[in-house]
Image (spheres, grey):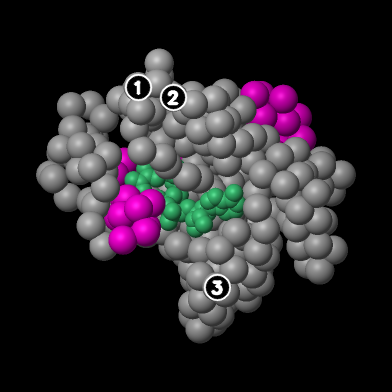
Amino acid sequence: MGSSQGKVVLVTGAAGGIGAAAALLFATEGAAHVALADRDADRLEASAGVVRDSGGSASAHAFDVTDEAAVAAWVDGVAAAHGRIDCAFNNAGISQPSTPLHEMEREAFEEVIAVNLTSVFLCLKHELRHLVAQGTGGAIVNTSSGAGLVPAPGQPHYTAAKHGVLGLTRLVAREYLRNEIRCNAILPGITDTPMLRGGGEDLTDRAREGLRKFSPTGELLDPTEVAAAAVWLCSDAARRINGQSIVVDGGGILH
Ligand SMILES: NC(=O)c1ccc[n+]([C@@H]2O[C@H](COP(=O)([O-])OP(=O)(O)OC[C@H]3O[C@@H](n4cnc5c(N)ncnc54)[C@H](O)[C@@H]3O)[C@@H](O)[C@H]2O)c1
């Protein structure tokens, strides 16, 4: 029996990279349904197609995770269609070119905070609204980053957002323990996803720098290796794990 057997799962940032890998893994681990969300409708539909081709049940929901009404409608719709929700992987995020803090425009800072932190608050809010009302318990995983522990040079916005994700994760773990709702975070290392290639083929300068500093072997992580940690944290095998931040980087952060 798979580790996600019978669960109704929500995944954001599911059009590619870690989110798409997680959606497929949840399905192959037996999820009853995976609801994939992303703002990139075409790539999202392709990811949902991969899940269906594997024999899984999947739906694609294209919206911006910083839009509260859209987030609420997504969670409400999935719960109505499937009778409940069980797990959520709040994973959507963006990165921006590095800029020293004293030269950074307020707009750039606020955009990264909105997509990488405020969206996690919004997803948590509406997921918890359902999980608390259901009284079924549940499991949530948020995607932080190595930058949630160690400041990323030239990345005040990304560093602040990913530290903030860890704070929200611990708060939810503590305050919803009585509802048997667990909340953990994964902190990926340098993972081979579209984010690292800035929309093209080549690694961005920031990705190269991260790889040099934080990859013990010089290799990029495979998105499925990272997604596996999120899927496990959502599983009943991890039922005693709550409020934790799991670094998935082969030990690079220790260098
Ligand atoms: N790749 C890495 O090395 C790395 C390292 C540490 C943390 N992370 C984190 O992992 C998560 C997944 O990133 P990834 O590496 O798979 O990159 P990715 O770019 O492949 O995936 C991120 C997805 O989020 C979506 N997205 C962005 N803004 C959105 C919005 N406003 N509304 C809806 N969807 C939106 C994108 O369309 C994209 O499909 C992110 O939170 C990222 O910060 C990645």
- In the picture, measured across the screen, residue 202 lies left or right of residue 99, that is left
Q: Nearer the viewer, residue 64 or 240?
A: 64
Whether residue 229 sits left or right of residue 208 in the image: it is: right
Q: Which mark is residue 104?
A: 2
Q: Which mark is residue 75?
A: none
Mark 2 in CB contact with mark 1 (< 8 angstroms): yes
Q: Residues within 10 Å of mark 3 (few under 14, many from 20)?
A: few
Circle 3/circle 2 CB separation < 8 Å: no
The amino acid beneath tag 3 is Asp
Image spot of residue 158 (x, y percent): 45, 31
Q: Which residues are magenta?
A: 171-200
In the rendered image, residue 71 lying in the magenta stretch gets the answer: no
- The structure residue drawn at horizontal position 40% and vertical position 21%, both measured from the top left corner, is 103
Would residue 145 be visible to someone looking at this image? Answer: yes
Q: Earlier in the sequence, mark 1 or mark 3?
A: 3
Q: Residue at x 13, y 45 (%)?
A: 218
Q: Looking at numbered disc 2 in the image, what kind of residue is underneath it?
A: Met
Q: Quadrant of the C terminus?
A: top left
Q: Identify the secondary structure beneath mark 3.
A: helix
Quadrant of residue 248 within the rendered picture:
top left
Residue at which label 1 appears: 100
